[in-house]
Structures are given as C-alpha cells and as structure tokens.
Image (cartoon, rainbow, N blue to C red):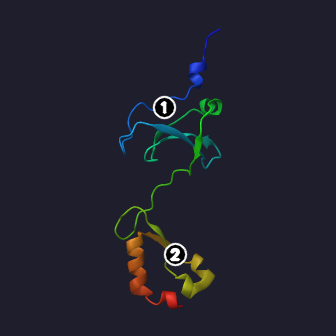
Amino acid sequence: MVNTSWKNAIKYPDHPCKYCGAKGWGVGHYVDAGGNPKYPFYCLNCGKRIPGFAKRKAVEKANIDIKELHPLQLPFICEVCNREGAEAHHWAPRHLFGDESEQWPKSFLCPECHKKWHRIVTPNMSEA
C-alpha cells in the first residue's frame, strides 16, 4: 500500500508576505458566490490575503484554527478622484427624499469627496 498522507497535508507558502515581509501564514475560510467553501492563506502579521488556497480535505483533517473571512471584493474606487476605499453615495439625500432615496441613482465617493459634496450641496443636512 502506498502512503498518500502527504496529499492531504496543508502546503503553506514558503515565501515572505509581499505586504509586510513577515513569514507566517494562517488559513482562512469563506463561502464563495457559488456556495463553495474556500480556504485562502493570509499573513499572520498584517492579515492580508495572498493568492493561493489550502486544499479542503487537508484543512478538514488538520487540527488548526481557521479565521472566518469575507469573500474578496474589489475595493470601490471614487468616481471623482479615483482613490480606493469609496463608499456608496445617494444622489437623492435620504433627509430630503426619505425611503424613495433608495430608488434614485447611487455612485461611489471616497470619504473626502463625499464630505465635500455634502458640505457644498446639502450644508444644512444635519438640521433637517
């Protein structure tokens, strides 16, 4: 009989994290849009994910802590200045349109551009 236990071992990356330079990896877990479990590697120092996944069977057999993660989402880009980290902006402000504001267009603005828009267009929003 051939020993195939090596096929079910978690093969951790052997390179340092490209974000912080540390060399320690953990295994995370999330369910993708198709309902499939995924086990990505992440840096134990900075928490960033890297390309590559641990095999499902290996993770299920290993006695390790698994960090619950969110599925990867592309960062939203500000439609004014092109910075990452944008947030949804309602073009029909809730304080003026009520629940109907959800039916109006939205776009993504970084926090700075979002504040600027409200400072100029709806300066008295907090008084409403």
- Looking at the image, residue 60 lies above or below residue 30: above
Q: Residue at x 59, y 25 (%)?
A: 8
Q: Which disc, if any, is residue 105?
A: 2
Left or right position of 6 against 50: right
Mark 1 crowdedness (10 Å alpha carbons): few <14, some 14-19, many ≥20: some
Q: Which disc, if any, is residue 12?
A: 1
**Farthest-out residue, top:** 1
Mark 2 residue type: Pro
Q: Quadrant of residue 38?
A: top right
Q: Nearer the viewer, mark 2 or mark 1?
A: 1
- Looking at the image, residue 92 lies above or below residue 79: below
Secondary structure of residue under mark 2 = loop
| Quarter of the figure with the C terminus | bottom right
Q: Residue at x 35, y 41 (%)?
A: 21
Residue 70 percent coordinates (x, y): 56, 52
Left or right position of 83 against 127: left
Secondary structure of residue under mark 1 = loop
| Quarter of the figure with the N terminus | top right
Mark 1 residue type: Tyr
Q: Which disc, if any, is residue 56?
A: none
